[in-house]
Each structure stands twice: as structure tokens, then as C-alpha cells.
Image (cartoon, rainbow, N blue to C red):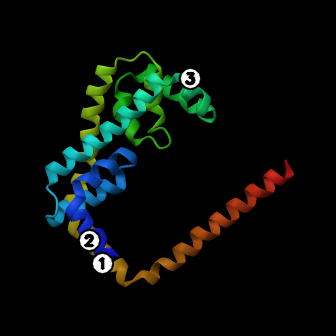
Amino acid sequence: MEEFLLSSMREYGYIILFFWSILEGESGLVMAGLLSHTGDMNLFLAIFIAGLGGFAGDQLYFYIGRFNKSYVHRTLKQQRRKFALAHLLLKKHGWPIIFVQRYLYGLRTIIPIAIGLTGYSAQKYAFINLIAAWCWAALIILPVWFFGDVILGAITWAKTHWYFALPFVFIVVGILFFYFKNISHKTLRA
């Protein structure tokens, strides 16, 4: 299975990276950094393609907000607070929020939709978004490429010493169990 994934990444890596960057991004960028380190991908082409994918995804969200306002308001009612926060951030900070939104957990897709809901210039958003997407791709891929030997060594060590992870797995499972148990007690009492 591992060999199949690696051969697929080597053969279709740039296509996978583009679509992965549209949808989610960071784990795909880490893979691209490692494949660039091993020579299976070109570093600068990987940054370029990943940036284009991130750009395309955010543009899609922007235009969903721009041309489907009633659908967005109707469908994403539970996200009203996040939309309000996104509008406040845009009003307070202006165009730099387009750069920062890629790193704000829970707001990465909301902010482009919220900007699309406003009268913000589509051309200005596209230009800033493109530059921000390439910076985002470079900020993740370059360190992974640079520290590739260390990361690959850690992966190799973890594969041979997998049993050291068991205590962490039990701790995470225990925390999740108690968390969900407490939530179910609170909802039953309410």
C-alpha cells in the first residue's frame, strides 16, 4: 500500500498537489516538501502548483459568497458568528486579512466567503489572494524540504518503534472518551 501511494505521488504528484491544495492543503504541502527533498518533485514547481491550488480554492469560496448570497445565508446559519467575525476582521485590518486567513483555524473557508458577500473588489482580492497563496505554499514546503533528512529519519524511526506511540494513543482515546461522556451528561441534564 505504501509503495502504491509513493508511486502515485511520483507519477501524478503535481495534479494531486493542486487538488489537495484546493481542498485542504497543509498535509499535501508537507508531502510535496518531502518529495522535493528526495528529488521526486521540483521544489519551485511544487510551490507554484500548490499556490495555484490554494488560490483556486479561495477564489471558489469568494465567488460562492459573491453570487450565492441567499444560499450562503440560508445554508450556513450556524456560521453567523464566524461571518460576523470575518467582516469585523476585514473592516479592521483590510487586505492583510487575506494573507492571514490561511492560518486562522476555523475561518479559512469562512473569510473568503465573507469577503465575497461584501462589495470588495474581485480583482484586488484575486491579486492579493494569489500572492498570499504562493507565500503560504513556500512557508510550508521550504522548511519541510530543508529539514527533509530529519523528517524522513523520524518517520523511519517511528515505523520501527511504533509501540512507543501506544501510551499517547491511550491518552488521546481516554481524553476523547471523557470529553464526549461529559458532553452527553450535559445534554441529558439540559
User: Where 127 sits versus 137, above or below?
Assistant: above
Q: Name the residue under label 2.
A: 152
Q: In which quarter of the image is the N terminus?
A: bottom left
Q: How far apart are marks 2 and 3 (CA)?
A: 48 Å
Position of residue 30 measured from the top left corner of the image (x, y, whole percent): 30, 58
Q: Name the residue under label 1.
A: 156
Position of residue 104 measured from the top left corner of the image (x, y, whole percent): 44, 40
Q: Identify the image quadrant of residue 8.
A: bottom left
Mark 3 or mark 1, which has the lower sequence index? 3
Could you tell me which secondary element the residue under label 3 belongs to? Answer: helix
At label 2, the amino acid type is Leu
Position of residue 86 measured from the top left corner of the image (x, y, whole percent): 49, 28
| Residue at image point 37% right, 35% down | 58
Q: Residue furthest top?
A: 119
User: Where 31 sits versus 171, above or below?
Assistant: above
Position of residue 72 measured from the top left corner of the image (x, y, whole percent): 54, 29
In front: 172, or 8? Answer: 8
Q: Identify the image quadrant of residue 39.
A: bottom left
Q: Mark 3 points at which residue?
A: 70
Could you tell me which secondary element the residue under label 1 belongs to? Answer: helix
